[in-house]
Image (spheres, grey):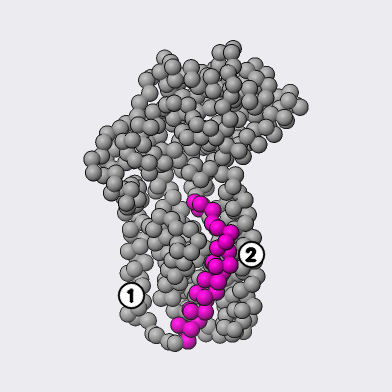
């Protein structure tokens, strides 16, 4: 017999409005400390190099030219918009030259105006994320600048095409990328300690983009060192690459649920239809699960929607981590998720559903001094047993989900023989 469902809910008198106003306070305490440490170190470095550095108008001119190029790049892609969550850009093409050609202070300052411009002109997001991004990029650029200036005394050697300075510049660009990625990866892992490091570090696509950024940064550095006016020739190809990159990311974002990063209902339905057609053609088995978070409204009412969103993300990440690469998982609507399991029979579907139920039940989301725990109910339907197409399978799994809730939640159920009309993906979720 399954244990009764529960949600750890304890009112936080006077806290929710403060968290809503200052989202950083709603994060895990180790994460808050880590992020504040990065920003404090960045500010300390800015103060130190401001006091010890030597002011030259030529450096200011070069810095201004690079920032103007970055601003033009942002403005030229502004109409495309920006995908929510973690995204990639090519602004390192302007940050890296500031690190290689100018004193370390300018590497620390370079991200600030461009991040401010992104916040005001492209898409406003939580301010602390912009601040931390600026600090991480600044610290990475400062380290690269210190190493390059220590290893290459004559900066003119880079523009003369000498092999050693160019190799050092490439090495410093790699160092910049590694430090920046590491700082952000540690933050991501601190936010979710159960995440795997390979999920927050590099994958093949990110590595390719890092190589492109590295090459652009070094080439722009050489161009800028030769003559500032040549930046006019370097700007158009960088803008074109930036637009292409953002366009590809926006296309991917159109298929993705913004809160959880899973497929949205429409994209999931298209992929599920494709899998069902393939299963019919090959005669393979296939299972469909509808997963609903029990008493999710209670979490929102007690802790606020920001914490509720963290619970949604936590459940989504837990579900995704327990599935195979070719399983199709999406957000159905509200607190419901849908999972299509190709080549899964009833035994395999029950085993997967039980694993999801168990793992989500052990998941905990921090909220001040409390740890929120939730349970899920799962409806299971098997192709050729409970239906032959997507609509029938959704209807059968939906009926099974209602049965699980009637039996006390935190349950896994299969449908009865009578199948009601299905709810369309994206419609209101079942009552919790």
Q: Say which quarter of the image contains residue 265.
A: top right
- The answer to which of 298 and 310 lies nearer the viewer is 298
Q: Position of residue 32 (x, y in %)?
A: 33, 52
Q: Relative to 146, is 276 above or below?
A: above
Q: Relative to 79, is 260 above or below?
A: above
Q: Residues within 10 Å of mark 1 (few under 14, many from 20)?
A: few
Kindly give the residue lying farthest to the bottom in the view shown.
Answer: 57
Name which of mark 2 and mark 1 comes first in the sequence. Answer: 1
- Per the image, is 74 magenta? yes
Q: Residues within 10 Å of mark 2 (few under 14, many from 20)?
A: some
**Is label 2 in a helix, a strand or a loop?**
helix
Q: Residue at x 44, y 87 (%)?
A: 57
Q: Position of residue 42 (x, y in %)?
A: 37, 67
Q: Residue at x 48, y 20 (%)?
A: 402
**Magenta part of the protein: which range?**
58-86
Asked if one can make out residue 164 in the rendered structure from this viewpoint, the answer is no
Q: Relative to 194, is 205 above or below?
A: below
Q: Residue at x 49, y 37 (%)?
A: 316
**Is label 1 in a helix, a strand or a loop?**
helix
Kindly give the residue lying farthest to the right in the view shown.
Answer: 281
Disc 2/disc 1 C-alpha distance (Å):
36 Å
Q: Say which quarter of the image contains residue 358.
A: top left
Residue identified by numbered label 2: 241
Residue identified by numbered label 1: 48
Question: Which secondary structure is most common in the magenta stretch?
Answer: helix
- In the picture, measured across the screen, residue 296 lies left or right of residue 351, that is left
């Amino acid at each position: 017999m399954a244990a009764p469902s529960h949600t750890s809910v304890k009112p936080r008198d006077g806290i929710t409005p403060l968290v809503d106003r200052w989202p950083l306070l709603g994060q895990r305490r180790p994460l808050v400390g880590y992020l504040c440490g990065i920003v404090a170190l960045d500010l300390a470095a800015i103060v130190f190099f401001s006091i010890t550095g030597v002011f030259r108008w030529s450096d200011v001119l070069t810095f201004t030219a690079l920032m103007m190029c970055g601003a033009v790049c942002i403005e030229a892609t502004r109409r495309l918009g920006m995908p929510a969550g973690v995204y990639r850009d090519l602004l390192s093409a302007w940050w890296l030259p500031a690190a290689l050609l100018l004193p370390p202070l300018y590497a620390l300052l370079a991200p600030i105006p461009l991040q401010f411009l992104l916040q005001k002109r492209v898409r406003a997001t939580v301010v602390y994320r912009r601040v931390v991004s600026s600090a991480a990029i600044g610290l990475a650029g400062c380290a690269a600048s210190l190493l390059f200036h220590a290893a290459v005394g004559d900066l003119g050697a880079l523009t003369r095409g000498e092999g050693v300075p160019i190799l050092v510049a490439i090495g410093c660009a790699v160092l910049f990328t590694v430090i920046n990625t590491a700082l952000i990866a540690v933050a991501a892992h601190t936010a979710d300690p159960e995440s795997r490091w390979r999920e927050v570090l590099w994958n093949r696509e990110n590595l390719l983009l890092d190589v492109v950024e590295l090459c652009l940064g070094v080439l722009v550095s050489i161009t800028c060192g030769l003559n500032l006016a040549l930046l006019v020739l370097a700007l158009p190809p960088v803008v074109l690459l930036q637009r292409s990159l953002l366009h590809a990311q926006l296309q991917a974002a159109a298929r993705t649920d913004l809160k959880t990063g899973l497929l949205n209902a429409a994209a999931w339905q298209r992929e599920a239809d494709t899998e069902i057609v393939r299963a019919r053609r090959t005669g393979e088995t296939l299972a469909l699960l509808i997963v609903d978070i029990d008493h999710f409204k209670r979490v929102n009412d007690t802790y606020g929607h920001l914490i509720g969103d963290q619970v949604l993300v936590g459940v989504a990440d837990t579900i995704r981590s327990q599935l195979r690469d070719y399983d199709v998982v999406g957000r159905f609507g509200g607190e419901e998720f849908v999972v299509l399991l190709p080549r899964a029979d009833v035994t395999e579907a029950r085993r997967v559903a039980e694993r999801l139920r168990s793992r989500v039940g052990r998941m905990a989301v921090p909220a001040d001094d409390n740890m929120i725990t939730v349970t899920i109910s799962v409806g299971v339907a098997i192709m050729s047993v409970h239906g032959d197409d997507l609509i029938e399978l959704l209807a059968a799994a939906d009926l099974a989900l209602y049965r699980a809730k009637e039996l006390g939640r935190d349950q896994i159920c299969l449908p009865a023989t009578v199948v009601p009309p299905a709810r369309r993906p994206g419609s209101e979720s079942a009552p919790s």
